[in-house]
Image (cartoon, rainbow, N blue to C red):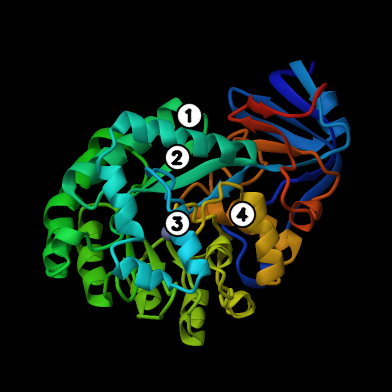
Amino acid sequence: MPTSVSLIVDEIGQLCTIPTQDGGPQRGSQLGELGIITNAAVAISEGKIVNAGTREEILDNYHADRVISARGRLVTPGLIDPHTHAVWMGDRADEFEQRLQGVSYQEIMAAGGGINRTVQLTRAASVADLVEAAKLRLTRAMQHGTTTMEIKTGYGLNVETEMALLNAIALLDVEHPLDIVPTFLGAHAIPPEFADDPDGYVALVTDQMIPLVASWKEEHWPDAVYCDVFCEEGAFSLEQTRRIFEVARRAGLSLRLHADEFASLGGVELAIEMGARSVDHLLATTPEDAERLGMSDTIAVLMPATPFGLGIANTAPLPLLLQTNAIVALGSDCNPGTAWCENMQFTLALACRQLRMTPAQALCAATINAAFAVDQGFVAGSIEADRRADLVIWDVPDYRHLPYRFGTNMAGVVIKSGAIVYDSIPGV
Ligand SMILES: [Zn+2]
């Protein structure tokens, strides 16, 4: 007797299951293991994958109330976006225009623009307005194949608004189909009121904000909550980063770091030393730090949309990271300043062109490895029994189309925890 399940996705031309490597992320040159099954099907029940295999294996063993046909198309796990700043108010289109006229991002920041401009608008907004604005972004991401998203605070930079942003993130997790992973980024920029006393702001982060985030976690969030710092010239020094990380770690928060976006301050080494889950950006990472990443479990999150958004070269040392056996993941960095793009397909397209990733490496970096970068590597990122049924039927026949084509949406049907949340293919 076949086992009864709630949904079968049948007639999959190419199923990329994206396996783990020995139960963990795909390290170094092992990146790109797709686990392809052709003429495949996936059985789903109660929001989880029951089994995935050839059509014969699935149809002989399972019976479903609802069967949808992929009609020979590509199916992959939902994309995981491990780095976004998706909750903010307003826009900075005028700064984009200034940058095109030759003003640098650092100059714009120094003149009160950049992050602090968004902070002003975000502080003035209500939680309800922030949630509404972010929902539109989350929906766009989901319609482009993202099923799990990390979201950072960092446009509040005072106790009240940083906590409001965390509450907005928690509301989004409840009210939107996407699974959300929260990160506290109080140390995103020095707010204007502390311009002459940056250490005073660091003390506000360590003495007031982090204890509140820790109690917020106790009350609202059983899974990992992260503390992130923008360790960069003009933002937070290495020493300030260490101070914040030490307090955050003692308070039970996990760590991740913005490092080496413009200059290498030693953040990668510090993050590894303190057991951070990821270091993100890495455009200025040294060969020595690439070696260190290769010997650690800290994941290197590359975000090609950011240098693209800034119109600068992508200098992340991908070949070296793969050679040293580092774990590489991809993220969007979706934010209003440098990379307003909710579409992870575009990140794949850029990763292949700017970083010379292969299409298979890019897909694995944006699924299983990105899942491990947000501690979801055992529940998402791969099509395997008992994981969340987060799948995308792409309106293409083969995984190589995902980075090969760009500028239009190739997501056909998005299935989130077993439910169809987006469907652009009539008759599927
Ligand atoms: Zn960022």
Looking at the image, residue 67 lies above or below residue 114:
above
The image shows residue 228 at horizontal and vertical percentages of 33, 59
The image shows residue 358 at horizontal and vertical percentages of 74, 66
Q: Between 203 and 101, which is closer to the camera in this rendering?
A: 101
**Mark 4, residues whose alpha carbon is within 10 Å: few (<14), some, or many (≥20)?**
many
Can the viewer see residue 126?
yes
**Of helix, strand and loop, which one carries label 1?**
loop
**Mark 2, residues whose alpha carbon is within 10 Å: few (<14), some, or many (≥20)?**
many
The numbered disc on residue 176 is 1
Q: Ligand 1 is located in which of the four quadrants?
A: bottom left
The numbered disc on residue 366 is 4
The Cα–Cα distance between marks 4 and 2, rounded to whole angstroms, is: 16 Å
Counting residues from the N terminus, which is met first, the one under dot 3 or under dot 1?
3
**Mark 1, residues whose alpha carbon is within 10 Å: few (<14), some, or many (≥20)?**
some
**Of helix, strand and loop, which one carries label 2?**
strand
Query: Which mark is in front, 3 or 1?
Result: 3
Query: Which mark is in front, 4 or 1?
Result: 1
Q: Between 249 and 258, which is closer to the camera in this rendering?
A: 258
Query: Which mark is in front, 3 or 2?
Result: 3
Report the residue marked by disc 2.
180
Q: Are marks 1 and 2 in contact (CB under 8 Å)?
A: yes
Q: Amino acid at mark 1?
A: His
Report the residue marked by disc 3.
94
